[in-house]
Amino acid sequence: MFEAHDLDPMIRRRREWTFLILVGIFLGSLTMLNILGVSRFIDLSSWIGIPDDSDFRFSLAVGVLPYPITFFCTDLISEVFGRKRANMVVWIGLILNIWVLLVLWLGGALEAPPELVNGRLAPEIVNGEAQVPYGYAFYEIRYLTFGATAASMIAYLTAQFVDVQVFHFLKKKTAGTKLWLRNNVSTLTSQLIDSIAVILITYYYANALPMQEDVSVAYQLMMFVLSSYAFKVVMALLDTLPIYFVVKKLRVFLRVEDEVGF
């Protein structure tokens, strides 16, 4: 491994750009997750053969779709740049969550319309027809994002730190071998924690899940957790070969044998 003062300027730039690109993808995915959050649920039951008349529905919040890439990025950063930088990225993600909340709060607090009820705008009834007032979409997204982000901040910190710690624990136990094992075990463990925490907090704290009145709450929460986790499991397993390929290419590109410095 090169020491920082021994690095060729070109290699140093490569490492800086690679790290910034991974962090950028991570933070961009995290931002989409928080803003889109639970604004829409996608029913994929028919895609996996669940009949329409079944009580079990395979539904995913749209914010879950970019989430697996965040773990792919932190695993890459952990493997190539080390635990300290991976933990640093996790903390930056927390700061980003707080920034998103601040901007949304400020945007809603400035010149807030008087007809807000619990932070939401109700459609106006004009000549017997409902009309969506100006700013309706913002306040709906703001309401849902506040709840989803508050839930995700707690789950995010827990899950990402678990991911990094389990990853490096297994890396130490396997003497740096079996990347497939630490990549999958760390991601699957942390995403189970994340799925449970986000669903429970979103329901009990934010009351932002589309619940059916004729189905038990416990059963519906279980469906949301299982749907979210199953999606994350499939995505985690699918990224096993890509992470081997990318790590191998990065080690050659960045000229490293172990965790890199700048």
Image (tube, rainbow, N blue to C red):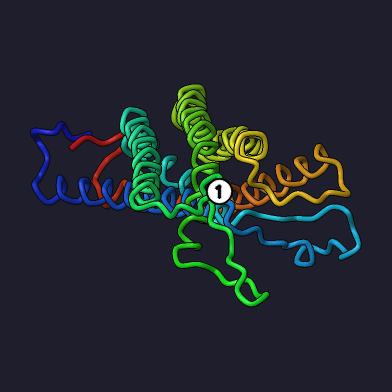
Mark 1: give few (<14), some (14-19) or many (20+) Cα within 10 Å: few
Name the residue furthest front. Answer: 127
- Give coordinates of residue 44: x percent, y percent: 72, 62
Decide: is 243 above or below 198.
below
The reply, left or right, for residue 83 in relation to residue 146 is left
- Looking at the image, which residue is at 34% across and 32% down? 82
- Give coordinates of residue 108: x percent, y percent: 40, 50
The reply, left or right, for residue 76 in relation to residue 197 is left
Residue 91, picture quadrant = top left
- Looking at the image, which residue is at 38% across and 53% down? 28
Residue 188, picture quadrant = top right
- Give coordinates of residue 148: x percent, y percent: 54, 44
- Looking at the image, which residue is at 45% across and 63% down? 135
Circle 1: residue type: Val
| Quarter of the picture holding the C terminus | top left
Q: Nearer the viewer, residue 245 or 124?
A: 124
The reply, left or right, for residue 44 in relation to residue 74 is right
Q: Nearer the viewer, residue 172 or 62?
A: 62
The local secondary structure at tag 1 comes to loop
Per the image, the residue denoted by label 1 is 117
Camera sees residue 247: no
| Quarter of the picture holding the N terminus | top left
Name the residue furthest right. Answer: 53
- Give coordinates of residue 80: x percent, y percent: 34, 39
